[in-house]
Image (cartoon, grey):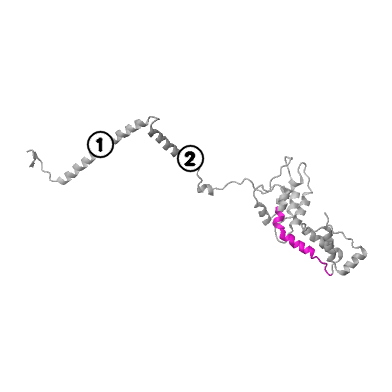
């Protein structure tokens, strides 16, 4: 026991340092409690003022809420990596537009499809694209369907005449981008019979000569074949005749003028 300054006996505290720490902790707890109560009272006052729709704090709160909603909507509309990686269903599966015809139902004979597929073009260097087009048109002309024009038949069946690299080439065009038969022919010949082949064919025609053991009829047939292989040669009939006569052997020329008077027809059959 020891005596306090006012003369009162108080018990002796043997753990005075621990007691001091507890007292300090108690004071801090009370101080924190007082601050918390004051903060709650201040928030209640602020809340009651913000109930008025005309208060600045209410307008600021509404603006903040509107911004949050806008940001959320923009986030929903934002394109993600998943959107780029997800596949889309193509709208068209063929580059040739389906022709519009008056007929409601069009049915092509299976025999016609088989004939067309018997004249396949694969885009190989030794293939003749002009001969392929000529044969394809001949086959299509064997069929006549009411209210269906010839162009529509060719557009519908041309894909069946291609195979391999040539079919892949046709599929490389944008869907439904080829709308007329003239466009199809133009693209086809530009790809498989470019200007370089035309120049090569013209050079072969202009330098045409008769073989030593070749008859006049054989030479004429071979010359017509060259004209057919290069239909875009641009040579007029008089120029063709001069090229043909210039390519004859001297003996053949003499026989030609002796028996025919130099008259000869070079026009290829239609």
Disc 1 packing (10 Å; few <14; some 14–19; many ≥20): few
Which secondary structure lies at badge 1?
helix
Name the disc covering residue 73, or none.
2
Q: Position of residue 69 (x, y in %)?
A: 45, 38
- Helix, strand or loop: magenta stretch: helix
Expressed as whole percent of the image width and height from the top left, the position of residue 123 reads: 70, 58
Which quadrant does the C terminus fall into? bottom right
**Residue found at the very far right of the displayed protein:** 259
Q: Residue at x 28, y 35 (%)?
A: 38
Is 134 colored magenta in this rendering? no
The spot of residue 188 in percent (x, y) is 71, 54
Q: Residues within 10 Å of mark 2 (few under 14, many from 20)?
A: few
| Any part of residue 108 in sight | no
Q: Is residue 39 left or right of residue 74?
A: left
Could you say whether the residue bearing mark 2 is in a helix, strand or loop?
helix
Left or right: 116 in relation to 32: right
x, y percent for residue 116: 74, 52
What residue is disc 1 on?
34
Picture layout, residue 172 above or below residue 260: above
The foreground one among 103 and 113 is 103
Q: Is residue 207 shown in magenta?
A: yes
> What is the CA distance from the residue labelled 1 to the residue labelled 2?
43 Å
Q: Give the residue displayed 66% in from the left and 52% down from the top.
A: 171
Residue in view at x 21 percent, y 40 percent:
27
Question: Residue 231 falls in which quadrant of the image?
Answer: bottom right
Judge by depth and name the residue closer to the eye, 217 or 57. 57
264 left or right, relative to 174: right
Q: Earlier in the sequence, mark 1 or mark 2?
A: 1
Taking the image as drawn, is residue 228 in sight? yes
Nearest the eye: 239 or 96? 239
Q: Does 96 sit left or right of 222 as displayed?
A: left
């Amino acid at each position: 026991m020891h005596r306090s300054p006012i003369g009162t006996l108080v018990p002796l505290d043997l753990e005075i340092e621990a007691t001091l720490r507890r007292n300090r902790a108690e004071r801090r707890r009370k101080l924190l409690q007082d601050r918390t109560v004051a903060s709650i009272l201040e928030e209640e006052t602020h809340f009651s003022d913000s109930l008025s729709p005309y208060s600045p704090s209410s307008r600021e709160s509404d603006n903040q809420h509107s911004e949050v909603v806008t940001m959320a909507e923009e986030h929903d509309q934002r394109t993600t990596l998943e959107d780029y990686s997800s596949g889309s269903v193509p709208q068209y599966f063929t580059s040739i537009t389906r022709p519009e015809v008056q007929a409601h139902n069009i049915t092509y004979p299976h025999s016609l499809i088989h004939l067309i597929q018997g004249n396949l073009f694969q885009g190989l260097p030794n293939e003749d694209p002009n001969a392929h087009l000529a044969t394809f048109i001949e086959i299509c002309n064997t069929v006549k369907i009411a209210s269906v024009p010839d162009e529509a038949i060719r557009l519908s069946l041309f894909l069946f005449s291609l195979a391999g690299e040539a079919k892949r080439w046709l599929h490389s065009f944008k869907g439904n981008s080829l709308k007329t038969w003239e466009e199809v022919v133009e693209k086809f010949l530009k790809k498989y019979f470019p200007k370089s082949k035309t120049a090569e064919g013209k050079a072969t025609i202009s330098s045409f000569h008769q073989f030593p053991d070749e008859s006049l009829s054989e030479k004429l047939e071979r010359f017509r074949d060259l004209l057919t292989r290069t239909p875009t040669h641009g040579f007029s009939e008089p120029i063709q005749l001069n090229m043909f006569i210039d390519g004859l052997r001297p003996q053949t020329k003499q026989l030609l003028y002796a028996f025919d008077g130099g008259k000869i027809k070079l026009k290829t059959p239609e």
